[in-house]
């Protein structure tokens, strides 16, 4: 049947054929899509440097990071020292408000996600998830508005109590010192906590839902209570997910602008030690000043702020990924 | 008063189990008129069976007959499934475990369970896996030498101490499938239960590991009451003293307990036609 002449008719012949163009096109499109993302990132960084270049060249690349005083009115076309556009206090404000936000949001998000995935009765889980997700749908300017007129007045008695208690502790007391005027790092941190809560909770929910039922039942079969089961079977294996969600939330907190600008007080002249004092973040100063940046190098210096914000966010995200990878390696 | 209702748990910390294992009522299970449901669906109806201590009872039957559900009713794990319910009674050591004043947490310390797929906790070392059931509750404060003794004793009981004693701090997931399953057995034994339930414990294992586990069951059966669900009739013949055969008339129908007899008799001289069909391989 299979004579040598019939070799080319063998059924394997089609294996040599070319794969259709559709598949190649698909592959190329995917590569392009991935490439565009990288390109956008690089172009943004390049654009920020380009726009900030006059200021960077005039004052020196790192001189912005050596001062915490932002005083555009001190700037002159000639003078280079000291750099009137110090940005350390903005970096500090971004870090402190985000930290406050995450310290409050993470435990709450873990608790809410645990409740939704493990504790709540079945009929309640879906509506509750939607409700939490809806928090993300509220525009940030509305959060800021709510912050000014609802949150700040409500905070006064609480914060005054904290000032008279925590504020008296020698050493760390300075961090909780008064006076308190409402607008503050603390208020901004609280608003951020509410704003990052939905995204972080959503990720936690996904992470917790991936715990195999086998392991949860194993814990139950050992006579562990529900809480002990969560601590034995669910939380340890969720570590990398929790860290990852935290990093994502932090990225969101770093970038959040309008709501923060509305409740932080926008004090740009120095780092305020107390979390109940007023300050500014890197994004809030940009939002506040770019329309009226008329002093020499003012607008260019705002671009420098934006550039460093990008750098910090990038570094935090990369660091976060490394942490996630390390904790995940421990799991595998 | 039985140990089950005693909130200090049936186990004296650091000591032996408070009753002589296997020889008294302590390891006895009595199921009567039990019906288990998932929502409205009945997994099985009206099952009555007495499970005696010191021997191995096998539950066999076709898929969907409710044998796994029956097993999960014996330690209350069934009730952790949303909308699951039971009627009838399950008496463990004379106590109805579904009575409202009995905590299923205590029940599952008394009645251990090993699952179909080996399920060691992936973030924990071998030693931590063994003591996972002891990290909380009244025993949590005991540390140091006592805990090390528990690890060694449990791993010895599970016949794997010599294999793992030099790598107790390696992850539990680094073991082979058969070793992982024995680690899970050690983990259950560490809590010092009186009864050990096994839900197809060898179905994910190779034949050699299966024989090792079966040997382990035979070795331990004087000290514990064993109830094992298996799809493998040869396994039931090899390892069990008593076999209960369950069946189901069709999909969606509730399962039923057809016959309970000594394993020898059930396989050589079954009394019910349905059992005959199943053990001779006509169905299932």
Image (tube, coloured by chain):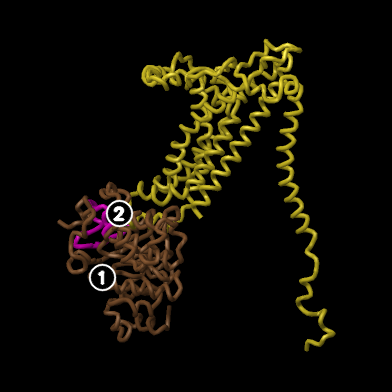
Chain colours: A yellow, B brown
Please report the residue visible at 38 percent of the width from the left and 59 percent of the height from the top: B38
Q: Is residue B100 magenta?
A: yes
Please report the residue visible at 24 percent of the width from the left and 68 percent of the height from the top: B223
Quarter residue A54 falls in: top right
Percent x, y of residue B147: 30, 54
**Front residue of B222 and B256:** B222
Give yes or no for contact between labels 1 and 2 (Cβ–Cβ under 8 Å). no
Please report the residue visible at 28 percent of the width from the left and 83 percent of the height from the top: B265
Q: Which residue is mark 2?
A: B147
Tell which circle, 1 or 2, labels the residue nearer the N-terminal end.
1
Dot 2: within a 10 Å radius of its alpha carbon, few (fewer than 14), some, or many (20 or more) residues?
many
**Distance CA(mark 1)–CA(mark 2):** 37 Å
Q: Is residue B232 magenta?
A: no
The disc at residue B199 is: none
Whether marks 1 and 2 lie on the same chain: yes
Percent x, y of residue A261: 58, 22
Dot 1: within a 10 Å radius of its alpha carbon, few (fewer than 14), some, or many (20 or more) residues?
some
* In this rendering, the label closer to the viewer, 1 or 2: 2
User: Which quarter of the rendering shows the N terminus of chain A?
Assistant: bottom right
Q: Residue furthest bottom?
A: A1
Highlighted range, magenta: B85-110
Q: Is residue B30 visible?
A: yes
Percent x, y of residue B183: 38, 63
The disc at residue B49 is: 1
Q: Residue furthest right?
A: A5
């Amino acid at each position: 049947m299979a004579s040598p002449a019939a070799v080319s008719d063998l059924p394997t012949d089609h294996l040599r054929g070319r794969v259709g163009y559709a598949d190649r096109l698909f592959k190329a499109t995917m590569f392009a899509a991935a490439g565009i993302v990288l390109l956008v990132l690089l172009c943004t960084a390049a654009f920020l440097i380009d726009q900030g270049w006059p200021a960077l060249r005039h004052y020196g690349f790192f001189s912005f990071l050596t001062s915490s005083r932002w005083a555009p009115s001190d700037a002159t076309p000639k003078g280079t020292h000291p750099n009137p556009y110090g940005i350390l206090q903005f970096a500090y404000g971004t870090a402190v408000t985000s930290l406050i936000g995450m310290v409050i949001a993470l435990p709450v998000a873990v608790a809410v996600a645990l409740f939704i995935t493990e504790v709540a009765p079945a009929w309640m889980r879906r509506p509750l998830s939607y409700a939490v997700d809806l928090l993300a749908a509220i525009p940030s300017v509305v959060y800021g508005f709510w912050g000014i007129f609802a949150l700040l007045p409500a905070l006064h008695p609480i914060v005054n109590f904290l000032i008279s208690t925590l504020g008296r502790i020698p050493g760390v007391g300075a961090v909780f010192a008064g006076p308190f005027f409402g607008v503050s790092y603390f208020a901004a941190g609280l608003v951020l906590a509410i704003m990052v809560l939905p995204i972080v909770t959503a990720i936690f929910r996904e992470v917790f839902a991936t715990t195999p039922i086998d392991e949860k039942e194993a814990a139950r079969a050992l006579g562990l209570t529900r809480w002990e089961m969560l601590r034995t079977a669910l939380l340890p294996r969720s570590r990398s997910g929790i860290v990852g969600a935290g990093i994502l939330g932090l990225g969101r907190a770093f970038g959040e602008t309008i709501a923060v600008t509305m409740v932080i007080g926008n004090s740009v002249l120095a780092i305020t030690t107390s979390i109940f004092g007023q300050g500014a973040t890197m994004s809030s100063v940009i939002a506040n000043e770019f329309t009226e940046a008329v002093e020499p190098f003012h607008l260019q210096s705002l671009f420098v702020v934006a550039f460093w914000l990008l750098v910090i966010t990038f570094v935090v995200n990369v660091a976060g990924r490394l942490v996630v990878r390390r904790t995940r390696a421990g799991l595998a | 008063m039985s140990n089950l209702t005693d909130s200090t748990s049936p186990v004296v910390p650091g000591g032996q189990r408070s009753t002589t294992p296997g020889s008294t009522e302590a390891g006895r299970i009595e199921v009567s008129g039990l019906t288990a449901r998932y929502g409205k669906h009945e997994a099985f109806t009206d099952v009555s069976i007495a499970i005696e201590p010191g021997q191995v009872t096998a539950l066999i039957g076709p898929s969907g007959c409710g044998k796994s559900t029956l097993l999960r009713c014996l330690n209350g794990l069934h009730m952790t499934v949303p909308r699951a319910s039971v009627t009838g009674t399950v008496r463990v050591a004379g106590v109805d475990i579904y009575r409202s004043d009995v905590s299923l947490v205590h029940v599952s310390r008394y009645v251990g369970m090993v699952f179909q797929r080996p399920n060691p906790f992936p973030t924990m070392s071998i030693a931590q896996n063994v003591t996972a059931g002891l990290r909380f509750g009244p025993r949590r404060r005991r540390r140091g030498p006592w805990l090390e003794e528990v690890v060694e004793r449990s791993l010895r009981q599970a016949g794997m101490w010599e294999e793992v004693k030099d790598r107790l701090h390696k992850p539990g997931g680094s073991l082979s499938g058969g070793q992982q399953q024995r680690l899970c057995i050690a983990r259950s034994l560490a809590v010092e239960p009186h009864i050990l339930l096994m839900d197809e414990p060898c179905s994910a294992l190779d034949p050699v590991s299966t024989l090792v586990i079966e040997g382990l069951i035979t070795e331990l059966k004087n000290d514990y009451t064993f109830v094992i669900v298996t799809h493998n009739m040869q396994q039931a013949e090899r390892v069990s003293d008593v076999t209960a055969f369950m069946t189901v008339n069709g999909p969606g129908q509730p399962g039923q307990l057809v016959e309970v007899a000594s394993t020898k008799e059930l396989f050589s001289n079954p009394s019910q036609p349905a059992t005959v069909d199943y053990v001779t391989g006509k169905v299932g």
